[in-house]
Image: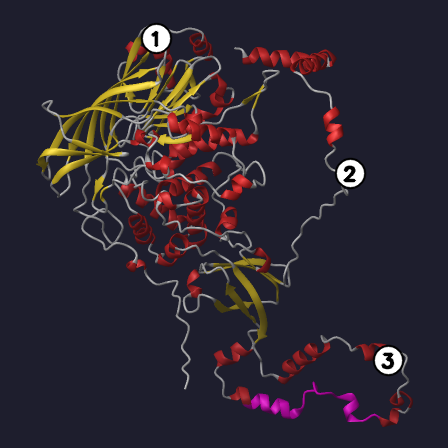
Amino acid sequence: MSAIAAEPFDDKFRQLDELLPTPTTIRTASGAPGHAYWQQRADYSIRATLDEANRSISGAETITYHNNSPDTLTYLWVQLDQNIYKPNSDSRTGATVRSRDAWDKPRGPDDGMKFDQMQSMMTARTFDGGFNIKSVKDGSGAPLHYVINRTMMRIDLPQPLKSGAKVSFAIEWSYNINEQKVLGGRSGYEKFDDKNDLFEVAQWFPRMAAYYDVMGWQHKQFLGTGEFTLEFGDYDVAVTVPADHIVASTGELQNPGDVLSAAQRQRLEQARTAKQPVVIVTQAEAEAKEKTRASGSKTWRFRAKNVRDFAWASSRKFIWDAQGFKKDATNVMAMSYYPKEGNPLWEKYSTQAIIHTIDQYNKYSFDYPYPVAISVNGPVGGMEYPMISFNGPRPTKDKKTGELTYSKRTKYGLIGVVIHEVGHNYFPMIVNSDERQWTWMDEGINSFVQYLAEQAWEENYPQSRGEPRSIVDYMKSANQQPIMTNSESISALGPNSYAKPTAALNVLRETVLGRELFDFAFREYARRWKFKRPTPSDFFRTMEDASGTDLDWFWRGWFYTTDHVDVSVDGISEYTVGTKDPEIEKAWKRARHDEQPVSITDQRNKGTLPRRLDSHPELKDFYNEHDEFTVTNKDRNKYNEAVEGLEDWEKALLKEGKHLYLVDFTNKGGLVTPLVLEITLASGKKYIERVPAEVWRYNPKKITKLIITDEPMTSLVQDPYWETADTDQSDNAWPRKATPSRLELFKSQRGGGEDMMKDYNEKLKTKESKESKDDKGAKDAKPEVKAAADQGAAAASK
């Protein structure tokens, strides 16, 4: 005896209760902060000095930590992020290489080892990085016991810190600044050919680790990918730098009279109401300072309120421009700092992009609350901190002519990275998600709003992320991890944490919810959680609560699995409703008969085969004049009897004349999705029919959908606008469409391969022969070419 068991039902629509944490009075089932919500606070007073010659920083800070939790704390955890540069850090000792094949048999430059990669590995072994903690003392100056655990430091409190209490303690420290282009990272210095440096300073002081209801202490080691989550607080910071340096910083400058000239202060005031960026430190002023070294130092003082971090940049090379932007509750000074190597690109686009970002992000979240927003050009390609961001793209300088040019990719790379990094002020600098756990909660959400802001910059903006079609290659690739994967366990960070969440939210906005419902819910999330610390469940629940839509299937498929969208249109059957009227029905059958192809035998017999009936017409009878499609009186009587007992509405249904199509769809990718059907009718009319994802609720693998039309359907296309991230468009159409491509032809290669004799006799090139050739080329050049080269060189020297 055998038993046949049904396959386990894969319910794509089961609720997320089994995955999401149980709601509490701290984090409610609606996704909002509850009445018992709490978070810690840390205020900082910092005094630091930049030693330009030794490329190091020393400082002293006082931290006032407020225990707003219901818990009593016996110790505190402090982050020492600079310790990632110690040779024995987990980041260094836990590093791996791609594969043995990438070393032994590189298929090309992308697989092989680069010079800068090898330099980085070698330098990391010898660089004396990391914090030197000189002292940790309590408020009375007594030493506190502390233990350093790689990038974390535990401070043992002499007395337990009770709920509602606060404690102050002081730390003295110093560290050597890394050369960013060699050792990488989110900060560091850049050295220029003119012997000047540019410093971008971040993660530069011991910072309080987060303590919150979901995690307790967030003491995961800093490995480099998972960024930060920190406590909000007020900062009072003084940085002492060489006297000829310009400092860009989180917060508002408190002593402009001590560090700026009268002309610079006047320009800064003018910029507050200007319609275009105003140059505060000109290129000529910056270039003059590049050639000398001022003696002495100046101290720049800044204050920032209710921020979770603090960063700054310093260099004598800085050009500085600014423009005020005031709208609704936002009143901000947008400012850019950049060396001359950033022009003409930076003076044209950076500050404009800052203002555009704030204007657009305000629409989708909340009014920008801070007084300053800064973009700095330096060695860091793109990194964000409160009120300040570090951004990398620059023009290219021709080594021979000095001509400065930039590619389209560089131009939009600058605009895009400024939008992205300034946008991070909203997510996660204000909506303070835990980046150490969930990269997508800041990078993915921010990249999505960046996508919206870029669309508002210009038509056909060349966006790299956002469109669902741009993520399909990743979604059908092997070795993926779900979006809901810890930051340090993601192998393809860009596609997984930036591009896929962006595409997912775009699908949610455009295809699942619609813009009105989505935008309301998204703003509600941003406003609920600004200056608070949301978790993934808070985002998921808020989006459902504020949109009034059960989206568990969406979060489960897009965020918790590696399923992808791949819907196939497998078959279509056409039906029309029988009228029972023999005049109509037999005519319909005759038409179907006449549509059948004429047999090859009948085709060849026609006109060539003599017929007896043609020569003897007397043989014809009733059946030669009537066929099976002839309507008889019996047919008519049967029809009359059939309709006699019908209600009027039943008779009307028989005469509707609608076309009914049964369409079979297969979910090959596993990720359930709404169906977007473009239907073309015989008249040429086209229309879109949108079917919700719930169509898959009873069978997530295969469904049959009924489509009713007024006239015959000639074609059907699933996902015609490529809006659902369907990974295979070849099976989305009925009838099937041919896929166009190109065949490239190549000449046959003939030859004997390597010719060692020829190679041995080749004339040896020397530096002198190369210079002689270059000189000859310059003499032979047309006058207008030489003039352009001279002009470019002169411009570059300014």
Q: Check if mark 1's residue and mark 3's residue have beta carbons within 8 Å.
A: no
Point out the frontmost of discs 2 and 1: 2
Query: What's the residue type where badge 3 is placed?
Result: Asn
Query: What type is the residue that disc 1 sits on?
Result: Ser
Query: In the depicted view, which residue is nearer to us: 411 or 176?
Result: 176
The way the protein has been coloured in the rendering is: secondary structure
Element at badge 1?
loop
SS at badge 3: helix
Q: Quadrant of residue 187?
A: top left
C-alpha separation, residue under disc 3 versus residue under disc 2? 63 Å
Q: Earlier in the sequence, mark 3 or mark 2?
A: 3
Q: Residues within 10 Å of mark 3 (few under 14, many from 20)?
A: few
Q: Residue at x 25, y 54 (%)?
A: 21
For label 2, the crowd category at 10 Å Cα-Cα, with few meaning under 14, some 14 to 19 and many 20 or more, is few
Query: Decide: marks 3, 2 in contact (CB < 8 A)?
Result: no
In the figure, is residue 592 to the left or right of 216? right
Of marks 2 and 1, which one's residue comes earlier in the chain? 1
Q: Which mark is residue 605?
A: 3
Above or below, 749 relative to 377:
below
Query: Distance between the Cα atoms at labels 1 and 3?
Result: 105 Å
Disc 2 marks a residue whose amino acid type is Gly
Residue at coordinates 73% horizontally, 31% vertically from top-left?
A: 756
For residue 751, the mark is 2
Write down the region rendered in magenta.
Answer: 620-641
Quadrant where the N terminus lies?
A: bottom left
Circle 1 is placed at which residue position? 261
